[in-house]
Image (cartoon, rainbow, N blue to C red):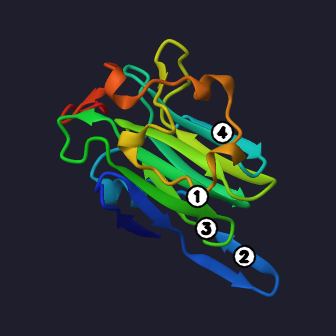
Amino acid sequence: MNFIRTDIPDVLIIEPAVHGDERGYFIETFRADKLEAFLGYTINFCQDNESKSSKGVLRGLHYQLSPAAQTKLVRVIQGSVLDVAVDIRKGSPTFGRHVAIELSEKNKRQMLIPRGFAHGFVVLEDDTVFAYKVDNYYSPECDRGIAFDDESLSIDWRLSKDALNLSAKDKTQPLLKDTNDLFEYGVNYYA
């Protein structure tokens, strides 16, 4: 496995080694020992989730506050997405900046989104299957979001706004500047 720090160093791209031949391929999609050795801290994933979506579906930008904050390890099994992580840690030198990476069944890349980041993705192909691990269970009380089209974030979702398909919840999320429900930079949310 190859771990790559992005422009926001806490967000990682993970490239698994693909072992393939004419019969197909094999990859290790997760190795706790290697990930934790690279990070220097432990992540205890407790739940796996999967969604299937059509082209144009946009899910996000979502996050959960403490004590239910989540780290996510995301990947695409079939199809492709543009995956986005936004730094929402007040006081961070990268506050309000984002990382956007294409994840696909072809490139087999994964992205690790730590606690303190909002996450979302837009589906680039029909019948895309998106899978992810989380290290905390879903909590409706702690569930929050930010507007996907917040101009201050400057996210290029690659599809025109009229081609996007959003949930009612995601159509009404607040702008980053209008929410006080954020994280503090420098706080250890893994303690």
Q: Give the image location of residue 37, x and y in percent.
A: 32, 58
Distance of label 4 from label 2 (alpha carbons): 23 Å
Amino acid at the residue labelled 2: Tyr
Tag 3 secondary structure: loop
Q: Residue at x 68, y 49 (%)?
A: 130
| First along the sequence among labels 1 and 2 | 2
Q: Count up the numbered dots.
A: 4
Specify which label sits upstream in the sequence, 1 or 3.
3
Circle 1 sits in a helix, a strand or a loop, which is it?
loop
Rounded to the nearest angstrom, the CA distance separating label 1 from label 4 is 25 Å
Q: Check disc 3: other Cα within 10 Å, few if <14, some if 14-19, many if 20+.
A: many
Badge 4: residue crowd in 10 Å (few <14, some 14–19, many ≥20): few
From where the camera sits, is residue 142 visible?
yes
Q: Where residue 74 sits in the image (x, y, percent)? A: 56, 50
Which residue corresponds to mark 4? 49
Nearest to N terminus: mark 2 or mark 3:
2
Q: Which residue is mark 2?
A: 25
CB-based contact (under 8 Å), mark 1 and mark 4:
no
Q: Please state which amino acid type lies under the numbered disc 3.
A: Lys
Quarter location, residue 99: bottom left
Nearest to viewer (mark 1 / mark 4): 1
Q: Which residue is mark 3?
A: 108
Q: Can I make out residue 31 in this image? A: no
